Image (spheres, grey):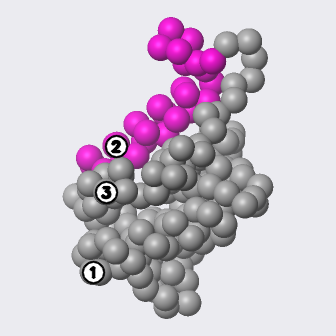
Amino acid sequence: MSDLLNRNSHRPAPLVNPQRWPDIANVPAASIKATIARVLFRRVARKLPLRVEFPGGEVLGRGGPVMRILRPAAFYRRIGAGGLIGFGEAYMAGDWAAHDLPGVLTIFASQVSKLVPPALQRLRVPPRYAGSRAPSARHPGKRADQHLTALRSVQRLVLDFP
């Protein structure tokens, strides 16, 4: 893990092979959703038993496991575009890192129902699928397969962590 995140640097090591995971390697376009994600994330981070560190020294949270936001603009754009999937993609892309990844994820998982206010949850529009049919268990589609591959990689990283 020390190769992925140098304590003295805010530059993440590259984690994504653009040929293997092009959707993760490419940062979504900026949008109003990224701005909303930024506001929501910062509001939630202030209340969590977590220490969120930003480039430049800004810190949010009430202490606990450290989450380092390494590329804030890309981080918010991914969350704005993909919600929880975007949060995972941001990790895979190196937009954020944590030495205690299970600890950070446990804190977010315990608060998942409170992360987005109910009024905004109702505004969420389900993703549109290209082609004639939406992914299903029988036909998961290319993007779902890429997410499963990324998830397996994160699981190996977490489970193999010394």
The kind of residue tagged 1 is Gly
Q: Is residue 29 magenta?
A: no
Tell me if 14 is positioned left or right of 99 in this view.
Answer: right
User: Counting residues from the N terminus, which is met first, the one under dot 1 or under dot 3?
Assistant: 1
The kind of residue tagged 2 is Arg
Between disc 1 and disc 3, the foreground one is 3
Q: Nearer the viewer, residue 140 or 129?
A: 129
Between disc 2 and disc 3, the foreground one is 3
| Picture mark count | 3
Spatial separation of the CA atoms under disc 1 and disc 2:
27 Å
The kind of residue tagged 3 is Gln
> Which segment did they paint magenta?
134-161
Q: Secondary structure at mark 1?
A: loop
Q: Residue at x 62, y 63 (%)?
A: 36
Residue 55 placement (x, y as % from top left): 55, 83
Q: Residue at x 41, y 72 (%)?
A: 45
Helix, strand or loop: magenta stretch: helix
Within the image, what quadrant is residue 162 found in? bottom left
In this rendering, the answer to whether 141 lies above or below 3 is above
**Mark 2 and mark 1 in contact (Cβ < 8 Å)?**
no
Residue holding disc 2:
156
Q: Is residue 155 magenta?
A: yes
Tell me if 61 is positioned left or right of 5 in this view.
Answer: left
